[in-house]
Amino acid sequence: MKSFGKLILAGFILIITGFVTLLLASLPFAEAKGGGAFVIFIGPFPLAFGFGEYSPILLLVSVIIAAVMIMIILMISKSSLKKADAS
């Protein structure tokens, strides 16, 4: 179980290192335009929000990612139900 904790710690360190690297790389370009988008799930219903110049593209990408996540969850739940029925 100790190796699992080390993997989690390594994952957090990699995430923080990536965040700091991106932050430092963006400092010289403080005037750059950008945007953002996010999807919030309230129960089974996704709510998508976007802002900035690139929000339509980012909204499309975030909705596609959300749809893929839903399909993966449905496939996993179907396979687990089949395994439970077989037992």
Image (cartoon, rainbow, N blue to C red):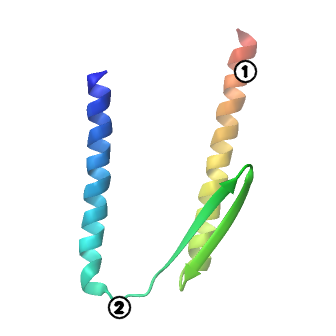
Residue that appears at 56% across and 71% down: 37
Which image quadrant: the C terminus?
Answer: top right
Please, what secondary structure does the residue beneath circle 2 have? loop
Kindly state the secondary structure of the residue where label 1 is placed: helix
As drawn, the residue found furthest toward the front would be: 42
Residue 18 in which image quadrant: bottom left
Residue that appears at 31% across and 62% down: 19
At label 1, counting other C-alpha atoms closer than 10 Å, the crowd grade (few under 14, some 14-19, many 20 or more) is few
Image quadrant in which you'd find residue 62: bottom right
| 17 sits to left or right of 84 | left
Q: Quadrant of residue 8?
A: top left
- The residue singled out by tag 2 in the image is 31
Residue 40 rendering spot, x and y as whole percentages: 63, 59
Q: How many marks?
A: 2
Residue at x-position 71% and y-position 16%: 84
Q: Amino acid at mark 1?
A: Lys
N-term-proximal mark, 2 vs 1: 2
Q: Amino acid at mark 2?
A: Glu
Mark number displayed over residue 12: none
Residue under label 1, please give it.
Answer: 82
Side (left or right) of 51 relative to 29: right
Residue 33: % across, % down: 43, 87
Whether residue 83 sits left or right of residue 35 in the image: it is right
In the rendered image, residue 21, in percent from the top left (x then y), is placed at 25, 66
**Which is more toward the observer, 35 or 61?**
35
